[in-house]
Image (cartoon, rainbow, N blue to C red):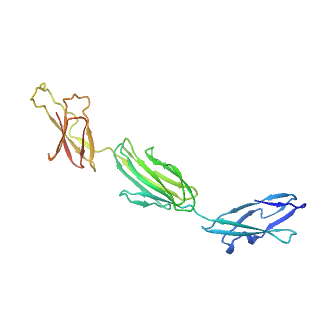
Amino acid sequence: MHIENEEDSALQYSFDADSIYTEGRSAMLGIMPITGVIPSKSRAPLDMFFTAPSERDFNFNLVCRIKHRIEPLYLNVKAEGFSVKADLICESLNGQMVKLTANGRNEINLRQVEPNEQAVRSLQVINSGKYPISFTWTVTNDSGLVKITPESGDIKAGQKSAATLTFVSSKKHELKNCLLTLSVLRGPTYQIALVGKCVPPSLMFSRKTVNFGTVFVNRPGMKGVTETVEITNNDSKPVRFVTHTANSKTFLKTSLKTFNNTAVRAFKNFPSVATLLKNSVKSFTVS
């Protein structure tokens, strides 16, 4: 703002020191310069600055005295102190929404996935303040395997923004020192450690080669020669697998059955698909 001097002579001004404080001196309004001289027929700039010590309204009644003038100039200045408020909610492993903290350590466990399997978590940024906010997400040390969308945005007062966190890898990988950060402009910052790994399923074949040896040319009514290979799941969870008979003719068939013969599944078309429970075995018959 400016103080204007419309007189033909210079004027000297000075703001009362007590008037730059609120009642009880709980806050102060800065003025630069607090005293000065205004040349005739000109104006002088005034810079005001204020830092709110708390979240409430402030009122200042400034008194500016002009030398050789009886009546001072009065100026009322109002200000409002507020803080940017933003809450972060994350979906837990059991599907519940958990509130994270901006003043401590947070962790999101993306668990163990198989290659090309996606781990997905939902997050919500909530604007619990009185004014709009802007936010930005960043991920570090993720090797490009972790994505969060949207990466930035604006939220109106009382509204929320949903974000989706994904982790997917095409090969064995473990997240180490991976950090997800939510930065709210002029507001809180949330830091979240991400843990998770991608591990290929632990399936084992009882043998890697099947040799049928010399066989007769097939005739109607003849039984085909069969060989059995066992597949063992040493993983901690069920594994879905596909059997491919690459570079084979149509007379090569596969079938799958459980180890204890309580259930039998035959597949005449390729590929064959089945789910193998953890710590279990299936016999794989090739004919």
Quadrant of the image for the N terminus? Answer: bottom right
Q: Residue furthest top?
A: 217
What residue lies at 23% left-to-right and 29% top-to-bottom?
248
| Residue 90 placement (x, y as % from top left) | 43, 57
Quadrant of the image for the C terminus? Answer: top left
Judged left or right of residue 192, residue 52 is: right
Residue 176 in sight in this render: no
Relative height, residue 33 to residue 226 (above, below): below
Residue 282 in sight in this render: yes
Relative height, residue 184 to residue 19 (above, below): above
| Residue 226 placement (x, y as % from top left) | 14, 34
Query: For this rendering, which residue is in front, 213 or 153?
Result: 153
| Residue 169 placement (x, y as % from top left) | 39, 43
| Residue 10 placement (x, y as % from top left) | 88, 61
How many marks do you count on the picture? 0
Q: Residue furthest left?
A: 221
What residue lies at 42% left-to-right and 48% top-to-bottom?
166
Relative height, residue 53 to residue 192 (above, below): below
Query: For this rendering, which residue is in front, 167 or 85?
Result: 85
Quadrant in which residue 212 is drawn: top left
Q: Residue furthest bottom?
A: 24
Quadrant in which residue 210 is drawn: top left
Judged left or right of residue 241, residue 91 is: right
